[in-house]
Image (cartoon, rainbow, N blue to C red):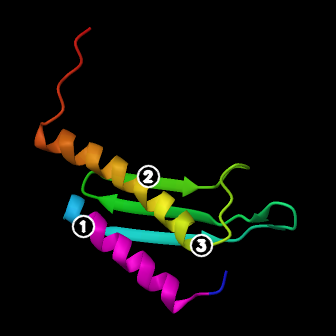
Amino acid sequence: MLPSPAVEVAVARWVERLECVYDRIQRCHVWIDLPHRHQHQGARFQVRIALSIPGREIAVVHDPGRREVHDNVYPAIADAFSAVRRQLQDYAQIRRGEVKARVA
């Protein structure tokens, strides 16, 4: 997919939202691909995010299935960043000691 200023702005906004969840983000790389164009299934945007924080790497690949085809790149970006945000929130809770230990 060719670079788009509008898509770059959307990604930058999502990164800002991530910084509200955990402010120690060191690096965030985002790749957006349109691997195949299927006439019957529509566009399938693949969004990959690699996030570096102290002591951990978080990686998400959002590759929509058959039921979840986005004809627009923005919902695919939102889904991928939502998945990263959930992982980042879980990690932040563990770091703050808010998660209770499992009782066996």
Q: Nearer the viewer, residue 55 or 99?
A: 99
Give residue 84's quadrant in the image: bottom left
Disc number for residue 19: 1
User: Local crowd at mark 2 within 10 Å, few (<14), some, or many (≥20)?
Assistant: some
Above or below, comparing residue 78 to residue 73 in the picture: above
Q: Is residue 43 magenta?
A: no
- Specify the quadrant that holds the N terminus: bottom right
Circle 2: element type = helix
- Specify the quadrant that holds the C terminus: top left
Q: CA distance from mark 1 to mark 2?
A: 15 Å
User: Local crowd at mark 3 within 10 Å, few (<14), some, or many (≥20)?
Assistant: some
Under mark 3, the amino acid is Val
Q: Give the percent coordinates (x, y) of residue 59.
A: 46, 54
State the residue position of label 3.
73
Disc number for residue 83: 2
Give residue 38's quadrant in the image: bottom right
Q: Earlier in the sequence, mark 1 or mark 2?
A: 1
Disc number for residue 90: none
User: Local crowd at mark 1 within 10 Å, few (<14), some, or many (≥20)?
Assistant: some
Circle 3: element type = helix
Q: Nearer the viewer, residue 13 or 49?
A: 13
Under mark 2, the amino acid is Ala
Q: Is residue 19 left or right of residue 66?
A: left
Residue for point 27% across, 49% down: 89
